[in-house]
Amino acid sequence: FPSHDIQGYRILGYAMEFFYDLSVFFFILGMKWMIHPSTARKGNFTASLGMGLAMVATIFSEGMGNYGWIASGLMVGTGVGWWLSAKVKMTEMPQMVSLLNGFGGAAAMLIVVAEAIGLADGGVLLDLNAERFDGMAGGYGNSIAKIPEIFYHTLLMLNLVAGSVSFTGSMIAMGKLQGFVPGGSVRWPAQRFTNNGLLLLMLLGMIVYFQSGHWQFAIILGLCLAGLLFGVLFVMPIGGADMPVVISLLNSITGLTSALTGIIFDNQTMVMGGVLVGASGLLLTILMCNAMNRSLGAVLLGAFQSGAATGSERTIDTTIRETSVHDAAVLLAYARRVAIIPGYGLAVAQAQHAVHELELQLEERGVEVLYGIHPVAGRMPGHMNVLLAESDVSYDKLMEMERINPEFPKMDVVLVIGANDVVNPAAERDPGSPIYGMPILQVDRAAAVLVIKRSMNAGYAGIENELFYDPRTRMLFGDAKGVLQKLNSAVKEV
């Protein structure tokens, strides 16, 4: 519209506000549909559509320019995102989540740096005595634009620190899961002193910034570098077993930065989206900690790994009872009820289709087959659900831990595929075990247990699994997909 066409700007403003409100509606609707697998794909598409609308509304907002750079960024981001999502394996999905979350933190950090450069170039002074400050309102409602200047700059500082910590922390978490960074708990002398000292240094930097009375880019850069370093030092001492919890926590922090950015730029969509991400990330963090019967503080301090190093003083029978594929097939084929417990080994071997084929074969013989799903099986909540959905396993057969535990005493056979710590009876029997108190799938109460495992290596907790030495347990060693394919052939011949 021409610059003098006030009515045109007003219509454009209303249209953009409508797009923003519609995008928030799609965010909420998408999250609601993601609750159930039958609507999860539709929910994912709806939430993506909401994000697309928000991007369109932002691009065509008043005062936007540099469309060449914007178009270049959109093309590069779309291409890389499409390629990554097409190539990523299900076993690497947590790394993907961590990577994308890190980019969100980096975006929040760079926004503050760009603001600092712009304000410094404009010679804008930080006047803490100013009554009101008119922020760079990206929206048209102007409901948040006028805020006290000290509040505005406080939000900027929080965004800078949180975004930089989230970026490097997420990158280290991704590296631990992918194997680029040592997966265990990496510690060093005076670790707490180093981390706490860095936190204090960042706090002092903020105080100096406010006392300086004007924008000092050196302080902004120093806080940015300190936040990036703290993100590394914060995540390195945490073992790989706890990375899903850390990723979820960092995801919540990134949501917080999005909400803060929305307040700074008077963008209600960013505020709502950030609140949704922050709240859901924090809730997921709490749920995972509860599923492992551990506090968030214990996770962040690496208490799990330190406990695992000491181990338990209980002595257990270490006799391994291996069985053949034929004998296992006979046991399964003549059972009345069978429970299948999928774990990370199933995901690594990409054996979801083979296990579904086994399920169908057993059902043809009149066997009732159910799946037991632990909240933290795999590398993140819902990992096993999505994996089995790929092979068209009916969602009605997937039973959460609380529902299936009472059923185990009625099971003739439980088939454990690649799961370890989530079925370890030490969590209930051994007070000296580092996983003691963690809710588990009580498969040891079944009449017989078959375990498919590559080797006798310990799980993420780094401790022996008492289930493998139980007199009712039989071991089938090998790659999960290969063993299941042999089992399928053997069941057909029974």
Image (spheres, grey):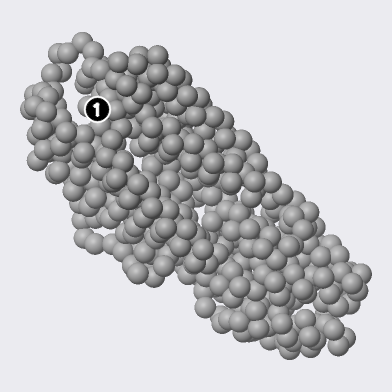
* Residue 249 vertical placement versus 346 (above, below): above
Q: Quadrant of the C terminus?
A: bottom right
Q: Quadrant of the N terminus?
A: top left
Which residue in the protein does label 1 denote? 154
* Residue 71 vertical placement versus 26 (above, below): below
Report the residue at 62% width, 44% height from top. Answer: 43
Report the residue at 24% width, 55% height from top. Answer: 191
Q: Position of residue 118 (x, y in %)?
A: 16, 33
Q: Secondary structure at mark 1?
A: helix
Q: Is residue 276 left or right of residue 317?
A: left
- Please identify the quarter of the rendering in which residue 333 is found: bottom right
Q: Position of residue 327 (x, y in %)?
A: 79, 86
In this rendering, the count of numbered labels is 1
Report the residue at 29% width, 45% height from top. Answer: 68
* Residue 226 vertical placement versus 29 (above, below): below
Q: Is residue 434 visible?
A: no
Report the residue at 27% width, 55% height from top. Answer: 233
Please name the amino acid that badge 1 sits on.
Thr
Q: Nearer the viewer, residue 188 or 154?
A: 154
Q: Position of residue 177 (x, y in %)?
A: 43, 65
